[in-house]
Image (cartoon, helix red, strand yellow):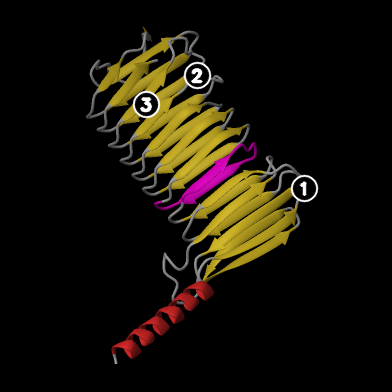
Amino acid sequence: MQSSQRLANVAVLVVLATATLAFGENRQDFRFKVGSHANISIVNQYGAVTVKPSSGNEVMVTAVLQSNKVEIDKNQNGNRIDVVSHLLPGATPESGRVDYEVFVPADANLTLHSTTGPLRAERLHGDVVLEGASANVEVRDVSDGHVHVNTLDGPITLTNIRNGHVEITSVSGDVILNQVDGPLVRVNSSSGKIRYDGDFAFGGEYSLTSHTGDIEATAPTYASIDVIARSVKGKVDNEFPLHPKDHTSFPIDTIRNLVGTAGKAASSVKLLSFSGKIHLKKR
């Protein structure tokens, strides 16, 4: 009887293993020919999306599906490509997960959405839009385009963004900007921390705002900036050599307000919080 029971157990394991192989990971590859400045949209409820530049005028998509509870809907209409993870009845965050690796022409305009992420885009110079709930968002080595990021609580990291039109909105996710510059850099967060480390270059408008989160901004002493830093309930610390301004739109309070200029004041820098701490640091 024991021998028969062991055989029965082995048979069950074999059946389960076969089922796992049959309905486990499934890799699918797609290729699309496009022209210049193509528009690529990928909507993925659960899972990662990573986008890198290709060497030609081709979009290459590799999707790894975790089960048969999700399908890939794809469509090309001229110079626009839409790829959507289509969840089937009974799908869960685990069984409905799809991980994408995508190669696009460097000048393509990109829109990515994933609830859980992570979302990554690098070495592009088209417009980039990334949206997610708890998705970890990372953008690096992007130039001469718009970078728009919207999340609820996912952390956001931007690195080496040159001549960018950058707009970031987050409810509670932390935002880190390393060497990010351009004519417009704007960050709004309700409770997340904001950290900027760069040059405040391009004679741009830089606005970092968090309702309750702390803001830390680091720049070199040669930065050319016109600074307004204000925390209504928090504290403003400054170690940057600034020339005071004679006229301001609000009463000066050296603990909570900072107004001044450095160099030729080419870029406008606003650091605003209701109750968070603001720290302007000299590199």
Pick the front one: 172 or 134: 134
Q: Position of residue 110 (x, y in %)?
A: 61, 47
Q: Position of residue 226 (x, y in %)?
A: 44, 16
For marks 1 and 3, give the CA distance: 41 Å
| Dot placed on the residue nearer the N-terminal end, 1 or 3 | 1
Q: Position of residue 44 (x, y in %)?
A: 52, 59
What amino acid does circle 1 point to? Answer: Gly
For marks 1 and 2, give the CA distance: 36 Å
| Dot placed on the residue nearer the N-terminal end, 1 or 2 | 1
Q: Quarter of the image containing the C terminus? A: top left
The answer to whether the residues at label 3 and label 2 have Cβ atoms under 8 Å apart is no
* In-image side of 111 versus 215 (left or right): right
Q: Within 10 Å of the Cα at label 1, are there few (<14), some (14-19), or many (20+) other Cα atoms?
A: some
Instruction: Name the residue beneath numbered marker 1.
Output: 35
- Using the rendered image of the protein, determine whether residue 69 is visible from the camera's viewpoint: no
Q: Residue at x 69, y 40 (%)?
A: 107
Whether residue 58 is situated above or below residue 190 in the rendered picture = below
Pick the front one: 34 or 279: 34
Instruction: Name the residue beneath numbered marker 2.
Output: 267
Q: Check disc 3 and report its element: helix, strand or loop.
A: strand
Q: Residue at x 34, y 22 (%)?
A: 229
Magenta-drawn segment = 118-134
Instruction: Name the residue beneath numbered marker 3.
Output: 271
Whether residue 165 is situated above or below residue 202 in the rendered picture = below
Q: Check disc 2 and report its element: helix, strand or loop.
A: strand
What amino acid does circle 2 point to? Answer: Ser
- Asked if residue 247 is among those painted magenta in the image, a careful observer would answer no
Q: Quarter of the image containing the N terminus? A: bottom left
What amino acid does circle 3 point to? Answer: Leu
Q: Check disc 1 and report its element: helix, strand or loop.
A: loop
**Which image quadrant is residue 183 in?**
top right
